[in-house]
Image (tube, rainbow, N blue to C red):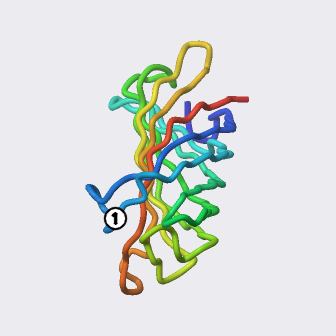
Amino acid sequence: MTPAEARAEQEVIFSAGKGLGDALIQRDSIASAEMAGINFATSFAEFPLTSGLWQWWAQGSYSHLRLDHRGERQKQNVFELKPVLRWYPRARAEGFFGEAGVGAAYLSDKHFGDIELTTHGNFALHFAAGYRLHSGAVASLRYSHFSNAYTNTPNPGFDFASLNWHFNF
């Protein structure tokens, strides 16, 4: 199948997760933060190669985070737009997969917990692993990072992990 023959597949993805501590990329912890989100993704290219099936997706996302910090209820709204590369080790879109995406994000507040961002506009990065059943149902686990990628200082960024359920149509 050539990229032009690939059937455009779409997904609505529901996410639930938690903020992460300072063990990975971010400087301060938001481990007590809770996250809920919804994503819309559409595939636009597919490349079956000997190394497996590679798919390009365009994804738009909204996530809402909330956190009780020093007796104050804080919230953060995150809007993302990014291309996503998904890889299946098989020649078909089933079984285990890995994916990575990088794009742009807008964060509603520059202050969240102990983290003080320098800009509302940030880069969005995620890595995910998932499994697609023969029925088309998909579950994935995602690590997401947001920061200004040192385009401004400081660059504290923040991270969260989420469990996702994909509805395909």
Residue at 56% x, 26% y: name it: 138
Q: Is residue 142 above or below residue 121?
A: above
Which quadrant of the structure image shows residue 120? bottom right
- Position of residue 53 measured from the top left corner of the image (x, y, whole percent): 44, 31
Give the residue at the far top of this rendering: 134
Camera-side residue: 162 or 138? 162
Give the residue at the far left of this rendering: 23
Horizontally, is 111 left or right of 75 in the view? Answer: left
Give the residue at the far front of this rendering: 71
Q: Secondary structure at mark 1?
A: loop
- Position of residue 1 measured from the top left corner of the image (x, y, whole percent): 55, 30
Which quadrant of the structure image shows residue 27? bottom left
Q: Which residue is mark 1?
A: 26
Residue at 26% x, 55% y: name it: 23
Give the residue at the far bottom of this rendering: 153
Which quadrant of the structure image shows residue 148? bottom left
Residue at 44% x, 45% y: name it: 161
Camera-side residue: 145 or 93? 145
- Position of residue 118 measured from the top left corner of the image (x, y, whole percent): 47, 83
The amino acid pointed to by label 1 is: Gln
Camera-side residue: 22 or 38? 22
Q: Is residue 41 above or below residue 52?
A: below
- Position of residue 85 measured from the top left corner of the image (x, y, whole percent): 47, 46
Q: Is residue 84 above or below residue 2?
A: below
Horizontally, is 121 left or right of 90 in the view? Answer: right
Badge 1 density bin: few <14, some 14–19, many ≥20, Cα 10 Å: many
The C terminus, quarter of image: top right
